[in-house]
Amino acid sequence: MEDINSTVISSTQTDTKSEPHHLSIPHQHKDAIGAKIGMWLFLFTELLLFGGLFLLYMAYRLQYSKDFVIAASELNLFLGTINTIILLTSSLTMALSIAAIQREKKKLSIFSLLSTIGFALTFLVIKYFEWSAKFQHGIAPKSPELLSKPNGEIIFYGMYYSMTGLHALHVIIGAIVLSFMFVFLVRNKISSKDYIKLENSGLYWHLVDLIWIFLFPLFYLLH
Amino acid sequence: MEKQHKEHMIPYGTYVLVWLSLISLTVLTVTIAGIEIGRLALFVALAIAAIKSTLVISYFMHIKFDDLIFKFFLLVALVTLASIFILTATVFFFR
């Protein structure tokens, strides 16, 4: 198969205008498998990014296991559990959105995608309330009250804020990416024949869910 | 190319079942955390997290039905990550 189009990602460009009339049907050379491999390679770099933080967490937890347990008891288990369920459900609606477009059910796909974005925003709102409650109790990064605690507890909250913060940033990015996918779906740029964009965004979204699956027991379920 | 494009379609029901298992495992891990089982608690919690991730990766992320190359990539990534963790833990315990 010859690569006539030098620009593989030509979905947003309209090459047809400059071409002669007999070539007006755009030659779209698309490689869904290749795109997916690229996405997975990116996800592995994300895995290493969070992996480094998890590694740090492990090293500190081995060193300060008692302080970690005391510090973790301050976290709101109820809100943590609710957020876990919200993210898991958002992963379901994401998968359903892709399954629906495969079956040419555009409306169902859009509805599922919007639910996913809705769950993402709910997650962030809950996270906001969780953090502000902590801040009100004086447990904020570098706050005098936190700094007066033992080292292990300071480190626990340092890790808590950096890891859930980085995760929340991924949720925000995910929600933005999914909003673009919503526009693509409405404009038929994503269809049952070409839905790799939606699939790759889904992969990103599931990674965000995966990371939370580990963050949750490591921060909220300590005894 | 055309053959590759005929992707495996997972029934909606399968996704819902996976989701139900994920929710049940979450309830289970929270319940277990309330019971005093000492140091074992961490390993139980991580084991449940590992099962949940396997479900997400296999079904939601479609790896179970993807080409072998994806499984191979994932294996390399996970083995790398696991080695780093094991080596670091070893350093801690035998220092």
Image: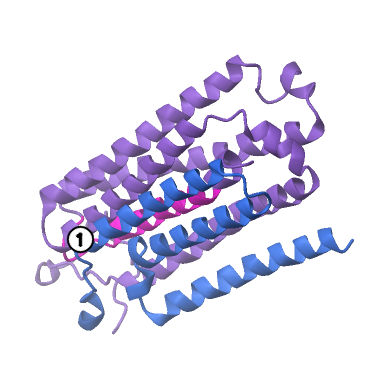
Chain colours: A purple, B blue
Q: Is residue A128 left or right of residue B92?
A: left
- Judging depth in this view, the residue of A200 and B81 nearest the camera is B81
In the picture, the quarter occupied by the C terminus of chain B is bottom right
Identify the subunit bearing mark 1.
B
In the depicted structure, whether residue A218 falls above or below residue A118: below
Q: Is residue A200 magenta?
A: yes
**Amino acid type assigned to the residue bearing label 1 in the image:** Gly
SS state under label 1: helix
Asked if residue A154 shows in the view, the reply is yes
User: Which residue is outermost to the front?
Assistant: B36
Q: Which residue is located at x 26 percent, y 72 percent?
A: A29
Q: Which residues are magenta?
A: A190-214
Q: Which residue is located at x 54 percent, y 19 percent?
A: A133
Q: Is residue B65 left or right of residue B68?
A: left
Helix, strand or loop for the magenta stretch, by majority: helix
Asked if residue A13 shows in the view, the reply is no
Query: Residue B58: x percent and y percent?
Result: 38, 67
Q: Is residue A188 magenta?
A: no
| Residue annotated with mark 1 | B13
Label 1 Cα crowd, 10 Å radius (few <14 / some 14-19 / many 20+) = few
Q: Is residue A193 left or right of residue A64?
A: left
Query: Residue A107: x percent and y percent?
Result: 11, 48
Classify residue A158 by image quadrant: top right
In the depicted structure, whether residue A100 falls above or below residue A186: below
Query: Residue A26: x percent and y percent?
Result: 17, 67
Classify residue A175 by image quadrant: top left
Q: Which residue is located at x 38 percent, y 42 percent?
A: A85
